[in-house]
Amino acid sequence: VSALLAEATSNKTYLDAAIASANFIQSHLHNRTNIILDSLSSRLNESCSVYSTTYSLDGSGTFIEGLVILADITHNTSTETLY
């Protein structure tokens, strides 16, 4: 959503949020088979662990869409290599 808002408004706040979101997803929710996992635990005893068996192809598609928009806005080749 933040990438779409950044594209529509040219607002730096939305761009910064899109970059932070992409970095978080890449660092914490992207698995070795290039699927985006879509569940984190918020339980105290699970320390924000990722549910590695919970994923959806919609999540991967949404992430790719956001990356394409973000790469188009920033012209950052390292972002382009992620999709």
Image (tube, helix red, strand yellow):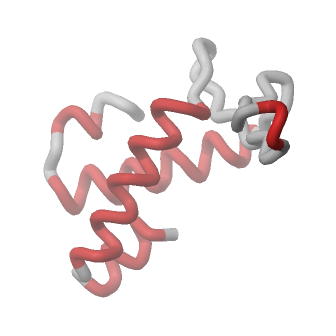
Foreground of the two, 77 or 48: 48
Foreground of the two, 20 or 67: 20
Foreground of the two, 35 or 52: 52
**Residue 63 located left or right of residue 47:** left
Residue under the point 14% across and 50% down: 75
Relative height, residue 76 to residue 70 (above, below): above
Q: How many marks?
A: 0
Expressed as whole percent of the image width and height from the top left, the position of residue 17 reads 38, 64
Foreground of the two, 1 or 64: 1
Give residue 55's quadrant in the image. top right
**Residue 41 located left or right of residue 1:** right
Expressed as whole percent of the image width and height from the top left, the position of residue 68 reads 37, 50
Residue under the point 33% across and 54% down: 19
Residue under the point 17% across and 56% down: 74
**Image quadrant containing the C terminus:** top left
Residue at far bottom of view: 9
Expressed as whole percent of the image width and height from the top left, the position of residue 51 reads 80, 29
**Residue 82 located left or right of residue 24:** left
Residue at far front of view: 45
**Residue 6 located left or right of residue 74:** right
Relative height, residue 25 to residue 5 (above, below): above
Residue under the point 44% across and 69% down: 2
